[in-house]
Image (tube, rainbow, N blue to C red):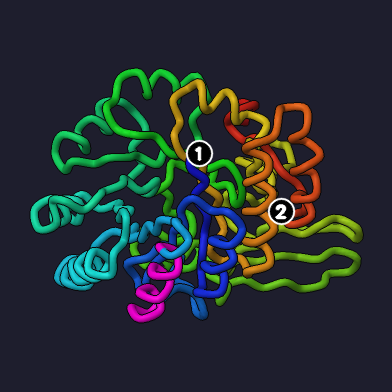
Amino acid sequence: MELICPAGTPASFREAVDAGADVVYCGFRDETNARNFPGLNFTRKELEQSIAYAQSKGTQTYVALNTFMRAGDEIVWYEAVDDAVRLGADAVIVADFGLMAYVAEYHPRQRLHVSVQASASNVDAINFLVDAFGAKRVVLPRILTIPDIARIARQITCEIEVFVFGGLCVMAEGRCSLSSYATGKSPNMNGVCSPASHVRYRQDGNDLVSELGDYTINRFPDGEAAGYPTLCKGRFEVAGQYGYAFEDPVSLDVMDHIDGLREAGVCALKIEGRQRGKAYVAEVVSTLRRTLSADSRSRPALIHRLKLLSEGQQTTSGAYEKRWR
């Protein structure tokens, strides 16, 4: 299975390549990219140089153009596709159906992957994208179980890629409006989920309080690791019970399920983390590279140390092992 690794900067890109990535995925420094944060991402020149470096090491590059086009300004996304193809991207990762149509019509030989942001999570949706736009691969949302993935794999004709480590989005990606509700900034349109500009921490007695926009997301007593404030990982009172309504503020880690994912028909394993630094990328990629070639008994020791790099210093198997609350 391919190991697909993140890069938010040229330095992280080189670290991912050197650490053993089969593929590095990244995006342009604009709203065509769902990680559109200050200080991240690539100019056209930086991407050209990074692709050349990857090619020299036998590594592929996927360019994420995974936001939805804004009516009247489609040219921004069209030009991003044109530039990604011109610079030698091995695949473009696309969420917007209109942009998929553009790729299919104007760059029919360009490999097209369906972004997780497209929220294609059933056989009919995926087969439609294959038939209509020639999609070669679908990145499945992080809400499916391994039996779900296996059932889908048996009935589609394109490849399957899944997330295995890093930030856990507990929603059907591409359909979440929580960040938009709290901050006015959309992950689907602006490329930002819970933007740092709207995040605040304050001390209240012995508690550290995290806030997003005008909303209190969590309170952490002394000694409890504090996660990044996103609404879907907030701690609230619901139906008379106080706790995490959707998911704990922890990172995804399903490397214990690699054999099951392989048997289910998955061909590529994706690490989340384009907002992370190059040290994180190097450590995670090199460890998971070794994990893929290790037997099941050796894997826990290899990946245990990665918990220290995870959100809240904890990890979860998400939908692979537990039910929704």
- Residue at 48% x, 42% y is 2
Task: Using the image as rendered, state which of residue 307 and residue 15 is in the foreground.
Answer: 15
251 drawn magenta: no
Any mark on residue 310, and which? 2
Q: Dot 1: what SS?
A: loop
Seen in the image, is 99 located left or right of residue 279? Answer: left
Front residue (pair 233, 292): 292
Q: Is residue 224 left or right of residue 194?
A: right
Dot 1 crowding, Cα within 10 Å, few <14, some 14–19, many 20+ = many
Name the residue that disc number 1 marks. 142
Q: Say left or right for 244 vs 188.
A: right
Q: How many marks?
A: 2
Label 2 is placed on what type of residue?
Answer: Ser
Provide the major secondary structure of the magenta segment: helix
Q: Which residues are magenta?
A: 43-55
Q: Residue placed at 71% from the left, 37% from the top? A: 240
Most foreground residue, 5 or 230: 5
Amino acid bearing label 1 = Arg
* Above-or-below relation of 298 to 62: above
Is residue 212 visible in the rendered image? The answer is yes
Provide residue 174's location: percent of width, then percent of height.
38, 49
Assign the C terminus to one quadrant of the image.
Answer: top right
Query: Which of 49/257 is in front?
Result: 49
Q: Residue at x 10, y 58 (%)?
A: 106
Q: Is residue 54 magenta?
A: yes
